[in-house]
Image: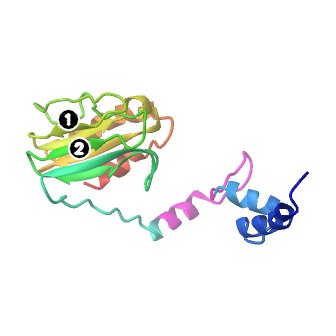
């Protein structure tokens, strides 16, 4: 037998949960994607209109500033401010000789440098799954690293140590890495633009 108090509270619960909307409307709102889709043959606006909108609303990229101190923590997360499967912070600028402490906050992650995406002469690293790892970075330049099991989801991060001496080489190498992403292919470009 169903508790009568439960039956009285249930409508109030749905009212609060969905802000007075009908259940179907609330579900549709939660599933809505703010993207305009056009099928073949439909008029989606001219390319000139689209470029005019793009030109009138430039995207401002916030440059990362030097992180204070000689030890820095980067969390390995399933979900963070920047999305799903993410390092936080995803982009960091540090001084030569600083130590980065990668913390396995969520399970099934690691941190590993990517071949060809560290400064020449820098040491590579490969942390074990579900384990914290600390790396001291003694070579100036840009480092790109990944979570091995989630690289296809673009779970990557960028560290600038001192000056970004190898930024052009990293940008070139990123064009070879991007096709391996099945999600978030813009991440690498976004991260590198913050340096």
Q: What mark, if any, has residue 101 been given in the picture?
A: 2
- 27 with respect to 175 (left or right): right
Q: What mark, if any, has residue 118 been given in the picture?
A: 1
Give the image location of residue 85, x and y in percent. 45, 42
**Residue plotted at (83% across, 66% down):** 11
Can residue 141 be seen in the rendering of this structure?
Answer: yes
Q: Which span of residues is magenta-colored?
A: 34-54
Which quadrant: the C terminus?
Answer: bottom left
Give the image location of residue 81, x and y in percent. 43, 56
| Depth check, front residue: 144 or 106 | 106
Give the image location of residue 67, x and y in percent. 19, 58
- 104 with respect to 164 (left or right): right
- 168 with respect to 44 (left or right): left
Q: Is the magenta region chiefly helix, strand or loop? A: loop
Q: Secondary structure at mark 1?
A: loop
Image position of 167 with respect to 173: above or below: below
**Residue plotted at (91% across, 51% down):** 1
Image position of 157 with respect to 127: above or below: below
> How many other residues sit within 10 Å of disc 1, few (<14), some (14-19) or many (≥20)?
many
> How many other residues sit within 10 Å of disc 2, few (<14), some (14-19) or many (≥20)?
some
């Amino acid at each position: 037998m169903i508790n009568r108090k439960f039956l009285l509270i249930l409508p109030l619960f749905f009212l609060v949960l969905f802000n007075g909307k009908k259940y179907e409307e609330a579900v549709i709102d939660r599933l809505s994607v703010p993207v305009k889709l056009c099928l073949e043959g439909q008029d989606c606006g001219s390319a000139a209109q689209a470029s005019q909108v793009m030109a009138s609303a430039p995207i401002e990229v916030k440059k990362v500033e030097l992180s204070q101190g000689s030890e820095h923590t980067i969390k390995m997360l399933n979900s963070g401010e920047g999305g799903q499967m993410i390092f936080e912070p995803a982009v960091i600028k540090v001084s030569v000789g600083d130590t980065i402490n990668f913390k396995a906050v969520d399970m099934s992650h690691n941190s590993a440098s990517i071949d060809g995406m560290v400064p020449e002469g820098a040491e590579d690293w490969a942390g074990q799954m579900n384990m914290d790892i600390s790396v001291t970075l003694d070579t100036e330049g840009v480092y790109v690293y990944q979570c091995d099991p989630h690289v296809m989801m673009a779970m990557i991060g960028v560290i600038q140590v001192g000056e970004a001496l190898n930024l052009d080489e990293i940008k070139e190498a990123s064009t070879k890495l991007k096709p391996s992403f099945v999600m978030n292919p813009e991440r690498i470009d976004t991260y590198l633009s913050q340096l």
